[in-house]
Amino acid sequence: MSTCLCLLARRVCQNRRLLKLKRAVKNAQTHLLFRTYGRLCRTATMETVDLWAEYYKTKERVSELPLPSNSDPNAVYANNELDLSDIDVYGFDYDYTLMNYKTSLHYLIYNLGCVKLIEQHKYPEGILDLKYDPAFAIRGLHCDLHKGLLLKIDSFHDIQMGTVYRGHTCLPDDEVKALYNGSHVGIMNMNSFYGTGPNMHQMMDLFSVPEMTLFSNVIQYLIDNDLAYDPEYVFYDVKSAVQDVHMSGRMHQAIIRDMTTYMDPDADIVNLLTQLSESGKRIFLITNNSADFVNRGMNYLVGPQWYNMFDVIITNARKPKFFYQYSRPFRSFDHRCGAKSWTKVESLQKGRFYQEGNFLELNKLTNWQGARVLYFGDHVYADLADATLKHGWRTGAIIPELADEVKTINSKVYKESVRWLSALEGLIEAMQDQERAESQEVIKEWMKERQELRVITKNIFNPQFGSLFRTYHNPTYFSRRLNRFADVYMSSVTSLLNYSLDHTFYPRRTALPHELHET
């Protein structure tokens, strides 16, 4: 029986590799056609051409090109080559890594934060009339504390026009450029290494989405009611209110009271942990949550005795400080009676709970070597940045939004829009030096169409802010940090089940600008 299963698994892997090869060939053929077309355009600049004739000829050529193959929303995507056969130890965060949550949790955070603003910070009760809109914000946005704006910034620190919001109002481009003396945000005005700075904060995790919406709603209420306000005060009041939702335990208590409403368990988590354990891999958990909250959630997700699947369990870790502050020792914790031990932790035992601690103590007590450890988390800064840069762990980012982004990218309207946008930009680049006045008028028409296409490809993801990963053209600032701190990324940690534990993830080779030459 086991032999048959092995043969079946091998055949599935072979079929998957063959499918990937076919897709790669198809995409390469499409790319070659674009390169050939680009060469024709550049040749055309040598002589006077009928621009509209060239335009329609190009449109016809492009319409005949095959659309790119679909991407897999359940795949693991590589920023850096990662060979799983090198990994002996697998580590996990808890929230949005092992345990997923429903959108109802964001409503809860928003509503509790709103009440806190009224009760503690004495904001007008009228803000209760502004409800949570789950489709308003995306994570990765920057909040300008002094100007009271939410905005999206690309990997070059340039603002994406059309994504700068004061309350519910999108600022026109000329106003944005006046506020920032252009579209570039200097590094001194950006956030620090961990996403916070004196002028801007980057909102990096999924829990920040209701916080951004609450901030924008409050700003809009104050504007509509002609109430004077300082944006920085509003930002920190909202931040304090939402943090209290987490720190006071009210959010966790609500989740525990009604797990089916807020938790979205993935049944394949058990299969993943079982596969890793039976393959002789070490498994650990590091979370900032309390032991009681994690225990109740994992009981719901995996079942009683779940902790026996883990070699090390660390709660109340205070990430990212866990990775760079080394003064807090580990405390053994008895989850049955809710008490810490008074004795010094000399070893970390399987199935036991430990609180606090720090990376150096973990490394000393386990002797887990950096490059043999693969750690998964959803927060690019708190979970992954120090783990990889300072300590050499391999890292995997869990981006739940990725699945929907990939489905959008796979849509016919998106593929056709991007295909024609790329061709139109090539046409503009090739023909822009035509000197005749009528030719320049045509170029202006093309530029107008280009902008319309850019707006379409933005709005298809989110009408306000577009894609989490891309601005009109460049990667977002979020993508830049993701690329720097995560070796691989995926929509769910259970995507690993689609691969063997000896699989190597290879990053896609993309041409550098100077490599895009015709032969």
Image (cartoon, grey):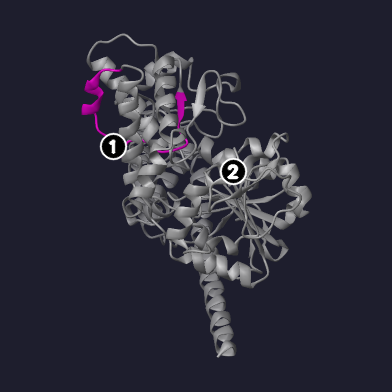
- Amino acid type at mark 1: Asp
Q: Which residue is mark 2?
A: 383
Calculate the distance from the C-alpha at mark 2 to the C-alpha at mark 1.
Answer: 27 Å
Name the one closer to the observer, 370 or 467: 370
Residue 493, image x, y percentages = 52, 58
Query: Dot 1: what SS?
Result: loop
Residue 477, image x, y percentages = 53, 35
Res 69 → quadrant: bottom left
Query: Dot 2: what SS?
Result: helix
The local crowd at label 2, few if under 14, some if 14 to 19, many if 20 or more residues have their Cα within 10 Å, is many
**Does the magenta run of residues contain 139?**
yes
Q: Which residue is mark 1?
A: 133
Q: Which residues are magenta?
A: 123-143
Query: Which numbered dot is residue 205?
Result: none
Name of the residue lying farthest toward the top? 228
Quarter holding the N terminus? bottom right
Q: Judge from the rendering whether residue 367 lies leftward or rightward of residue 173; answer left or right.
A: right
Name the one closer to the observer, 444 or 436: 444
